[in-house]
Every structure is written in C-alpha cells, then in structure tokens.
Amino acid sequence: MRTNREGNLKRFFDIQQTDFVLEVRGEALPLREAEYDYIFWNPSGAKGKEICVQNLYKLLAPTGKLVVYFDNPFGLHAFSAGTPGGEPDVAYPLLETLKDALTKSGEVYYDKCYYPYPNVEFPCVFFSDERLPGRGECEEGFYNFESARMEAFDERSAADCVVAGGMYPYLANAYMLILSKTPPENLPVYTRFSNERREDAKIRTDLYKDRVCKCALGPEAERHVMAMQGMQTSLRECLQEISLLGRPFDVNQITEADEEKRSISFVFVSGQSLEQTLDTMLQEGKEEEVSRVLLSFCKELRGSRRLSDFAVTKEFEEVFGEIPQWQSYQWKSLPVSDIDLVAQNILLADRAVVIDYEWTFAISVPVDFLIFRFLYFYLEAKNRACVLEPQKIYEQAGITPQLKEVFLAMETAFQHYVQHGAQVLCNSYDREGKPVLTHVQIEAQVEKLNGKTVQIVGGDVVTAKRSPEGVYLYKLPKASEGMKILLDGFDATENPCVLRLGAMADRGGAHTGLSLETNGMHFGGLLYLFEKEIPQVTIHGIESGDNGAEISVEEIEMSQAAIRELKTTIADMRFIIDNREQQIRDLKNSASWKVTKPLRALKGNKEE
C-alpha cells in the first residue's frame, strides 16, 4: 500500500498480534498447519480450486474470522472509468451466494457485510447495510492509481443518485464480508479512519446502533482523544445562547472514557445533519431559504455575548501560521473555538447537536474564521457553487475577498498542522496516480497537436505542419553554416520527452542527410531523451550551396518508468563497453600477447 491508509482493512479488527493472521495470496494454501484468528482473502485474484471459502474456513480457530474482500468490477469507480467488467461471480452476486449458502449450513455465521470506500486498497470508510452513505459522502471518485482513464461522468453526483435510489449495495466500489464459527459479536455499523494525520491525532470513529466511539490509533493520539472531555463543558457554554432553525445548540454528551482502550464513547443521536437538510432544500429549489439559514447562523456566532478581543499567540501561529497586520482586522474570539463547526457536524434533532468537536482549541481564534469555514465547506468544498452564489453569501456574512484570502492561508496552515508530514491520498495521487482526463483537457491536448513552433537562435520562429504520421516537419531557411534551433514547442522542463529527430539538406532537389548535436541523451538511431530544459538542436553539415533544409520532429509516447528503464539499460551497456575496452587494453599489455605477436604476424593478422 502506498499511503498510511495501508492496513486499515486489518486495523478495522484491532489486530495486535500477527502470528495467527493469514493473508491468502497465490493459488495454494499454506503448508503450515495452524488455527488462524484471522484469514484475509481476496477472491478476485484466485484461480486455483484449492482456495475456496470451505477450505479456508477449516483453518480458522474456534473464535476466528474469515474476511472476504474485493473490489466490485461493476462499481461506480469502474463505470466512471468507462471500464466496467470482470468476472461476473466476483461482484454482488458472490455476496448473496455466500450469505445464502453459509448461513443455511448452520456451521458458519455471517457476521456482517461492509462496503469499504473508496476501495479495498485505500479504505478510509466502512459503510454497512445499517449505515449506507448519505448524500455527498462518496466524494473521492477522482483518484485512480492503477491506470489512466477518461472521466466519463461526475461520479460524486452519480453516487448521490445511486444512494437515493437504494442501489448502493449493487454498485458499491468494494465489499468486505466477515464470516466466523461463533455467533456474531456487536460490530460497528459504520467506521471511519482519520489516520492521514500527525501521529498524535490519528483516530478511528465507530458508529454503533446505541453509541458513537472515538479511539486513538496509537498511544501518541490518546491525549488528543481524551482532551474532548475537557472541551465538552466549555464548548457547550459557548454555544448555549445560539440557536439554529429554532433549535438550541448543544454538544454530543460523552458517556464513557476508557483510558485503557484510549477511547471515548458518546450518546447516539438520531437525525439529519444540517448539510443533508440544506441539500434537501436545494433539491426542492429553495436556494434563498438555504442562504437565509447559512447567514442566520453566521449572525448568531458573530453576535455572541461571550466574544472578546482576538490576539495572536505563539500557540495560534503554530496551528494557523502568521497573519501580517492582524491588528487592523479588529477580530473577536470565543473562549474556545471548534474549528470543525461545519454543517456536516451539526445534527438536527430536538436540538442542534455538535457531534464532532475533536478540533476544539482553548486559544484565541477569530470567530470570522469559524464563519468562513462554516460557509466554505458547504458552499465550495463540495461543489455547490453551481447552485448558490458563494461570493454574494460571503459578502453578506462580512467575509470580503481580502479576508477570504487571509482565511484560505490560515486553512492551508491548519491542514499542514493536522497532516504534519503524513502521507495523504490526495498528495500521493500527484506522485503515483495515473491521469484522469476530462473532455475539456482532451480537447486542449488535441488542439496542441498542430502548429508547434521552433525558434531559430538569432532568427525567426518557424511553424510546423503535422503530417498524418504524427511527425512535425519544419522548413528551415537557407544558411551558410551550422544552425542552432530551440524546440520550444516540446518543452521538457516539467516532464521528460523522447523525440525522434532527423535533418535533410536540399541540394538542388536532392536531399542529403545532416548530422545533429543536441542537449539530450542519445538513445541510439534517431531517438533522444530531453529532461529539465527546452530541447536544443544544432545542425551540422550545411553547405553554402544548399537551398535550405528540413528537420523532422516526432514525439515518442513513453512513460517515465520506460524512460528510467532505458537510461538504466544504456548506462549498463556503457559500463560493459568501457569494461571490455579496458580488458582489451590489459590484454595487449600482457606478456603473453607480446610473446605471441610474431606468430600472429605469420598468420597475416594486422594489428595497430
């Protein structure tokens, strides 16, 4: 796995000892005879008949669990990529078959089926039939690490429609089925891992039918989890005079703190989140009412009687960065500030309950920043700008364009503080992911296929015409000596490029080959690799009587991995050649070579 999401599939079961954990790979069962506490099996890669549920089940300890997990080849990810397909039995029907056969046998218990999201390689959320995703919860449709693809449709919107239509179990991206020999235990109906963070803030959130539990994923994060106990009362006091949609504010009540398990349990509160409520209003065409609700909450926060003057402290700058001329803004601050006081974390029951307040600070934070985040994460972070008018709402809430820039910088600093060097999926995608192209990007690339230019050093710009074979042909003016050219239409400053170069002189109607000198790496033949600079070509062999020349440039599509492999191969070949030349020199200087020189001369061998 390539980010710190690695292992979330196993962290789900809170596995401490790995001696009796089996991860099935390949086509054969292990020779070791043991009873395993956990067996993990992905049937999508299985080909041999030896590996099946029945045989794996025999290897389980009496209290062991068999975990069957796989990506759905007919899931939304596949349709979004335009590549649905695969083995028909490795999809939703397999789940139904397993549930049926195993529960009827009386020997195997079907504990629960989960839907890992976004897939089994990078699972951060585990939904279940008792807690399916809500609107806006399937947001990570962009990432695709295995192959380049075209964005066929808006996966986020499609996921919302699938969820609303009750079709998510059929079109989920992935499945995880838990089987055991003992009656099912009380498993969570929903789990979210927040471990793309600094070590002292990595947690897991479990939703049960009767409670919510937040647990530190390591001893370093215990303080972060337990700190919510102290913030509960302070935050409740700050919000008690504020109301939302006629409901008084409250914070979710902590019912238990278990220091041994490094966990805190909260009351389970049923109801819709403010975000879901506002989205329903938007679906009904009530844009103005949504704006009124958002602005009303902003007004309530800014009108709190518990506000005092804001002042920058060292602790503030560690989290939110430096703010030049902060005194000029005349900001106010609450005694404690819940940074995540956003629509998604406000549940509407008989009260407006703040259900997640782990990022509550007892330091001075501008209340305007809380207002900005409340608006930003509803209006822009989930792409509702096409329905509402964000800039208008910001201005009505007192957030000017200048303030927005300041708060965006604070938000960036806060995210860096939270991540603190952790490997995050969205950052890993830039390094390891394959391109996901929209139709706009494809059109832009097609547009670039014609009219690429070269710059003759000290001369004019020459525009090329692209031949049907994909080669750019440049007609160069008459010259009395060598000509230097910048291929500025093939810029390699960002990404390496491989070009096939050829040059011919026009000598009275006859075409004569010319020699080339470049700032690239010669692969052999006419192939050259250019990196980190604009390709430069100097043409030699031009004679005074030539009637101009022609240069052909062809872009060779190669992945960076292929380029690295070629460079390594060439380096290896050069090493071998240099080594052979040294061996020849050593041989010629040896005594045996000198002694046998007359004999070789008699045979007619010529030597330098």
Image (spheres, grey):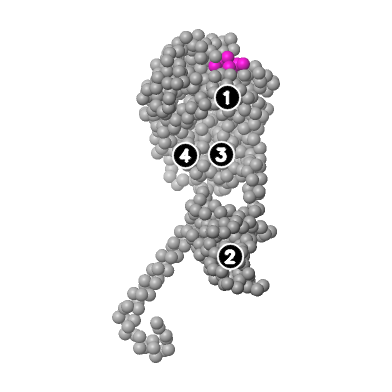
Q: What is the CA distance from the residue labelled 3 to the residue labelled 4? A: 13 Å
Q: Residue at x 63, y 24 (%)?
A: 389
- Quadrant location of the C terminus in the rendered image: bottom left
| 478, above or below 363, in the image | below
Which residue lies at the image location 57% right of the left edge and 22% below the top edge?
394
Label 1 SS: helix
- Horizontal and vertical percent position of residue 105: 58, 32
Between marks 1 and 2 in the image, the one whose residue lies nearer the viewer = 2
Q: Please rate how many residues cluster around mark 1, counting C-alpha atoms within 10 Å: few if below 14, some from 14 to 19, many from 20.
A: many
Q: Is residue 13 magenta?
A: no
- Quarter of the image where one finds residue 222: top left
Q: Which residue is mark 1?
A: 378
Residue position marked by numbered label 4 in the rendering: 3
Q: CA distance from mark 3 to mark 1?
A: 22 Å
Q: Which residue is mark 3?
A: 143
Mark 4 is surrounded, within 10 Å at the Cα level, by few (under 14), some (14 to 19) or many (20 or more) other residues, namely some
Which of disc 4 and disc 3 is earlier in sequence?
4
Report the residue at 46% width, 28% height from top. Answer: 410
Q: Residues within 10 Å of mark 2 (few under 14, many from 20)?
A: some
Mark 3 → mark 2, Cα distance in angstroms: 40 Å
Q: Residue furthest left?
A: 591
**Left or right of 22 on screen, residue 157:** right
The disc, 4 or 1, on the residue closer to the chain's N-terminal end is 4
**67 up-or-down from 277: above or below:** below
The magenta span reads: 292-298
Q: Secondary structure at mark 3?
A: loop
The quarter holding residue 216 reads top left
Residue under label 2: 502
Look at the image and tell me whether residue 550 can be seen: yes
Residue 297 covered by magenta stretch: yes
Q: Amino acid at mark 2?
A: Gly
